[in-house]
Amino acid sequence: MVSYRMLINGQLVDSPQTLDVLNPATEAVLATVPDCSMDQLDAAVAAARRAQPAWAAQGIEARRLLLREMIRRIEPRVAQLSELLTQEQGKPLTMAAGELKSMLRFMKGLSEQTLPESVNEDSAVRRSVTRRIPLGVVAALSPWNFPALLSWWKVVPALLTGNTVVLKPSPMTPLTVLSIAEWMVDLFPPGVLNVIVGGDALGPRLTSHPGIDKVSFTGSTETGRRVMAAGASTLKRLTLELGGNDAAIVLPDVDLAKAVPQLFWSAFANSGQVCVATKRLYVHRDIYQAFAQAFVAYAATIKVGPGLDASTQLGPVQNKPQYLRVRALIEHSRQAGHPILFEGDIPEGPGYFVPVTVFDNPPDDSRVVAEEAFGPVLPLLSFDTVDEAIRRANASSYGLAGSVWTRNLNEAIDIAQRLETGNVYINESFYLSPNAPFAGHKQSGFGVEMGEDGLLSFTQPQTLMIRQDLF
């Protein structure tokens, strides 16, 4: 079994205690990893604080060169990492490779960004210039659904802007991140990048640590509230990318042959474990029956199984707590008598496999509609008017993303602009860019990732005012 270690102050380190990492397709132990002690956490934060002034002083171009080298070290190892990612996360091998390629795309795009400098006044008397300076030490906490992508899209802009980082991946999916960190041990000055892993006690201690200046967290809204509270005592800067209950609105003029497969994968890719996945699918009543029939027929062609099986299209849910929650959500609707349009097959034996499950018009106040399932469960919901669809789509405490499906561009834009979400897609889903801001509305988030706004969130403004007439 491969040995995995944490990266603290430029050294690969073990810990007296360990955690088991399970393969969700088999429920067998895949690897053991260190369980970071509180002393090791303190050492990681202290190392980051010591390293930060010199790292910031290098200048952005010197930092950019090291980030480019980091990317070059990862690129030839994508195939090796893909298999590991599938084993720890559960997603099919092709999707694991897709995540890693997306990770590299984001790393490249984010590493090429630059910080603006603005001149506010330039007269004979005074020159006023605002520049951006780093916050200090950033704690980056990534989730288990896209552990590689969501870790490094936090790390790259934080390092580029002159911060140092303590990265904590989910203890359920730390292996790909730890492998990448090991390849960087001699790249950055000691303390610039630290990667730690730990159980339930580590996250709260990290997010409340007095040596941390900013927390960048991706995860559930419930946990996000706790992160926000933990940072209050020292007024930490926060970026929180949280849950979503994203609605898709399908108008009657869509081409069903094209839209149905796209909408299926918008809901079920990664077994529904995507923050911007379609979780409520509103279909105009005029085409509801035809759409439902085509959707079920397509769903029946999808194979659920272990991610390393080349024929698998959907893997297991990543961990047992989430598996139990999704199964309970399905059972709650079943007991309430909500009609099931489709329930797929799953492999026999171990593994956190949940069948693709599609409900037919459950009530808007049912759990399967009102809650974020984060699993392979979807309600199909009919509507009569566009105003009704928008009202029902917006009737949520979440506001991460949404989508509109129609051939009428003007109507699509009108609907999109009325949806209370940070991202709105027209005739597509999921697409994110390192150059476009990604931010949740309502209880889906706080702060911004990506784009110039995301880059600036790792900095603070400093304005220099110079009395020029005295020189």
Image: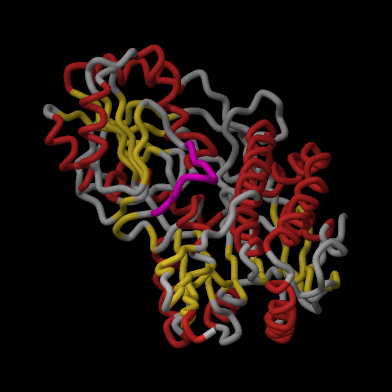
Look at the picture and state if 234 lies above or below 451: below
Could you say which quadrant of the image residue 35 lies in?
A: bottom right
Q: Position of residue 89 (x, y in %)?
A: 64, 47
Q: Position of residue 430 (x, y in %)?
A: 46, 37
Q: Is residue 278 left or right of residue 32?
A: left
Q: Position of residue 227 (x, y in %)?
A: 46, 73
Residue located at (23% from left, 23% from top) = 251
Is residue 437 rendered magenta in the image?
A: yes
Q: Is residue 284 left or right of residue 440?
A: left
- Give the main secondary structure, helix, strand or loop, of the magenta stretch: loop
Q: Which residues are magenta?
A: 431-439
Residue located at (45% from left, 63% from top) = 240
Q: Position of residue 278 (x, y in %)?
A: 38, 38
Could you say which quadrant of the image residue 108 lies in?
A: top right
- Residue 29 visible somewhere in the drawing: no
Residue located at (51% from left, 52% from top) = 450
> Where is the C terminus found, in terms of image quarters?
bottom right
Q: Is residue 127 left or right of residue 103?
A: left
Look at the picture and state if 219 lies above or below 72: below
Q: Is residue 206 left or right of residue 61?
A: left
Q: Nearer the viewer, residue 358 or 345?
A: 358
